């Protein structure tokens, strides 16, 4: 038995290495294996409603609506997300974020395909310029997970591929030295391979007036395997001040693998912030929001924004009325120290900044 194992191990060493008496670079091997692992996990995300219902022991009555609503914006959830859902519970807060429902197909007044005015802010292909000093790059349309409330669920990614129009976007940034911060968004920029990400970041940091890089990503929470060694090496090599804004809505999303991934990002010196969306049936509860802020802080992440739902077509069933949202936030204020209280904001198309919801309510509808 021992002999056979020894022979097998020997056979695994490349022949050239054996001849030259050098040891294979196992560190590099591990890194490549890790890359393949997250890409495999991302590519293998569950996309079929039937498989979702079977895997999570959910009622068959959910199948038809899930298939119909999933036609326009497909179901997508990686295995590590599914593992955090309680089987047999249609109200599970993580399930609600990914399960297509019949309500998505209903029209609702005030809900539109582009509620935040992305179309009007597109100043170059794949580039949005909404706010003073900052531009946002639509790096990809791909995400590790499809969140049913996503305000970009109707975004025309196919017509706006940054990677094929990158020179034009970079020229736009170079020509305006008031731009000091570039935000990588999408889709999810961490859906790009490390090689692509590195090439993009190198071109951005070569622009003299860019001081800060911001990465908006749901991957550390949705697909913690993404935070692999070669990504950490890449992050450590960035010369710009770098902030990562993660997206987490419920404390149940923060399992051990996510907390570990966040710890690895922190060790690279990244500033980690979180933005959540206030979602009916998911986190519209003071206790849930308090635990979310506290658990994020324990994981090295500051709660930054709590967004009032962007009124995107198909997400109306997630909306918490504004007065209720404000009352909830006030109750949260009573329970948390100021540094753990996220700002409750609303994005208004054409506005030069996010608006505190209390202010937006006083000034009336958009
Ligand atoms: S990860 Fe972000 S961009 Fe992707 S579907 Fe979710 S909310 Fe939308």
Image: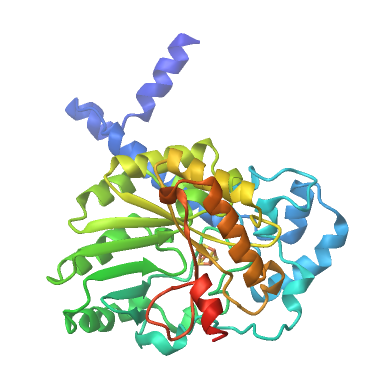
Q: Nearer the viewer, residue 335 or 48?
A: 335
Q: Quadrant of residue 208?
A: bottom left
Quarter of the rendering occupied by the C terminus: bottom right
Horizontal side, residue 118 vs residue 230: left or right: right
Q: Residue at x 26, y 51 (%)?
A: 234
Would you say residue 346 is visible in this rendering? no
Furthest toward the bottom, the residue is 120
Instruction: Give percent across and percent down for residue 217.
Output: 43, 59
Instruction: Give percent across and percent down for residue 314.
Output: 68, 76
Furthest toward the left, the residue is 208
Would you say residue 265 is visible in this rendering? yes
Q: Nearer the viewer, residue 130 or 21?
A: 130
Horizontal side, residue 94 vs residue 54: left or right: left
The image's colour scheme reads rainbow
Q: Quadrant of residue 206?
A: bottom left
As displayed, is residue 31 above or below residue 159? above
Horizontal side, residue 210 vs residue 362: left or right: left
Furthest toward the top, the residue is 2
Q: Residue at x 45, y 63 (%)?
A: 188
Instruction: Give percent across and percent down for residue 109.
Output: 70, 86
Q: Nearer the viewer, residue 78 or 239?
A: 239
């Amino acid at each position: 038995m021992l002999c056979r194992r020894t022979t097998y191990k020997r056979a695994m060493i490349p022949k050239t290495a054996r001849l030259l008496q050098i040891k294979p670079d196992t560190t590099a091997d591990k890194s490549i294996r890790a890359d393949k692992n997250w890409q495999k996990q991302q590519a293998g995300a569950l996309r079929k409603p039937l498989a979702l219902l079977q895997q999570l022991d959910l009622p068959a009555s959910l199948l038809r609506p899930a298939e119909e609503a999933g036609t326009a914006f497909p179901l997508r959830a990686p295995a590590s997300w599914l593992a955090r859902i309680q089987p047999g519970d249609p109200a599970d807060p993580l399930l609600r974020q990914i399960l297509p429902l019949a309500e998505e197909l209903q029209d609702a007044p005030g809900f539109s395909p582009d509620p935040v005015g992305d179309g009007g802010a597109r100043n170059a292909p794949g580039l949005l310029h909404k706010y003073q000093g900052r531009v946002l790059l639509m790096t990809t349309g791909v995400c590790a997970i499809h969140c049913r409330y996503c305000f970009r669920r109707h975004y025309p990614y196919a017509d706006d591929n940054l990677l094929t129009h990158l020179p034009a976007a970079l020229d736009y940034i170079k020509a305006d030295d008031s731009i000091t911060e570039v935000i990588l968004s999408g889709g999810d920029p961490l859906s790009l391979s490390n090689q692509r990400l590195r090439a993009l970041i190198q071109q951005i940091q070569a622009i003299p007036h860019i001081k800060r890089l911001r990465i908006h990503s749901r991957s550390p929470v949705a697909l913690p395997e993404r935070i692999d060694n070669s990504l950490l090496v890449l992050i450590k090599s960035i010369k710009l001040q770098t902030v990562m804004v993660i997206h987490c809505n419920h404390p149940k999303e923060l399992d051990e693998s996510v907390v570990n991934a966040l710890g690895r990002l922190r060790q690279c010196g990244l500033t980690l912030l979180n933005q959540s969306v206030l979602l009916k049936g998911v986190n519209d509860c003071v206790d849930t929001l308090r635990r979310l802020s506290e658990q994020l802080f324990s994981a090295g992440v500051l709660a930054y924004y709590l967004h009032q739902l962007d009124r995107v077509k198909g997400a109306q069933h997630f909306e918490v009325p504004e007065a209720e949202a404000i009352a909830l936030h006030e109750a949260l204020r009573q329970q948390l120290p100021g540094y753990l209280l996220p700002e409750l904001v609303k994005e208004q198309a054409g506005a030069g900044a996010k608006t505190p919801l209390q202010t937006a309510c006083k000034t009336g509808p958009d």
